[in-house]
Image (cartoon, rainbow, N blue to C red):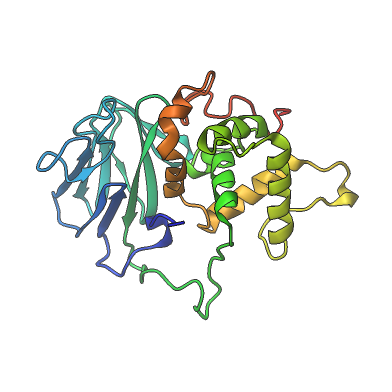
Amino acid sequence: MNIPASLARGVAPARPGTLHARTVTGGIKVPPQPGVTIRFGRGDQPDVDLGVGEHDLMVSRQHGELTYRRRQWWLRNTGQQLVRLPEGQLMHKSTEPVPLASGYTPLFVRGSGFREHLVELYVTGHDDSGPVSRRSADTVPPRKWSLDEDERLLLVVLGQRYLLYEQDPRPLSYSRAAEQLSYLRPGEKWGERRIEYRVEAVRRRLHGGFPYPLMHDKSAGRPSDNSLLHNLLRGLVESTTLVPPDLGLMDDDLDDLDDLDGLDGLGGAEGVNGVNGVNGNE
């Protein structure tokens, strides 16, 4: 299985202030020059520099722009749909432009149904020397964890809110995850018990050295499976084992999922969850 490339894993060394931008259709690299503006949206060149949501009529032809001024890149929403930044920050076309911090920033363009289109941004900082090999570096690197194909898909489905960088994300319920996996992998009998078994197996395999607790502390009283799954998903996203482009593992069947009764939008008021907590108890 090919793991999608992501700016979350770093960029090659470049002049401080350089903007790197990537969508599923390609990427661009732009040096910092006062007044330069980069546009993204459903349209084609020369109207936009970076295509996003090219098959989604809810995405504007020119949906947003990035302008370099006062030694920073400033983001502005010029489209009809909202743009969402990390921690749930929403931008309307009337919202004042916001400056991008150095490093990685994912933004999501609201589309049709429950689609959200990812635009990855990375601004090279003064201390950014480019990506460091996580396998051979002498310094302590972020650790990525090994997942097989089924585990990765399962954890992407359960961790959609984490990969969308929502504020205070929670895992998808096992019942809703089973519904989505049944559409993504018809005939494989993804039920709640199978999901519970696979999640527990991953927790047991990774708990040694993982940054957050993955196993029950019997001395602390009754365990909370929801808290342990939250710890697992949080650690996988923070280590870049799971990155936003991994949501593309679900993309081929988005049209089928859109027909599922009661399935809410990825970024809507209810989200894909519909309930909080792994088993809907919170």
Going 48% across and 28% down the picture, which residue do you hit? 257
| Vertical relation: 18 (above or below) 190 | below
Q: Is 102 left, or right, of 78 in this rendering? A: right
Horizontal and vertical percent position of residue 7: 37, 57
Work out whether 190 lies above or below 203: above
Horizontal side of 80 relative to 215 (left or right) equals left
Classify residue 93 as left or right of residue 141. Answer: left
Residue 228 sits above or below residue 270 on the image: below
**Image quarter of the C terminus:** top right
Q: Nearer the viewer, residue 105 or 214?
A: 214
As drawn, is 113 to the left or to the right of 218?
Answer: left
Asked where in the image residue 190 lies, by quadrant, the reply is: top right
Q: Is residue 226 visible?
A: no
At x 55%, y 53%, the residue is 149
Q: Residue furthest bottom?
A: 138
Q: Nearer the viewer, residue 207 or 179?
A: 179
Question: Which residue is pictured at 59% across the width and 44% down the height?
Answer: 154
Q: Position of residue 217 (x, y in %)?
A: 84, 52
Q: In the rendered picture of this protein, how many numbered marks are placed on residues?
A: 0
Q: Quadrant of residue 50?
A: top left
The residue positioned farthest toward the left in the image shown: 46
Q: Quadrant of residue 256?
A: top left
- Whether residue 30 appears in this view of the structure is yes
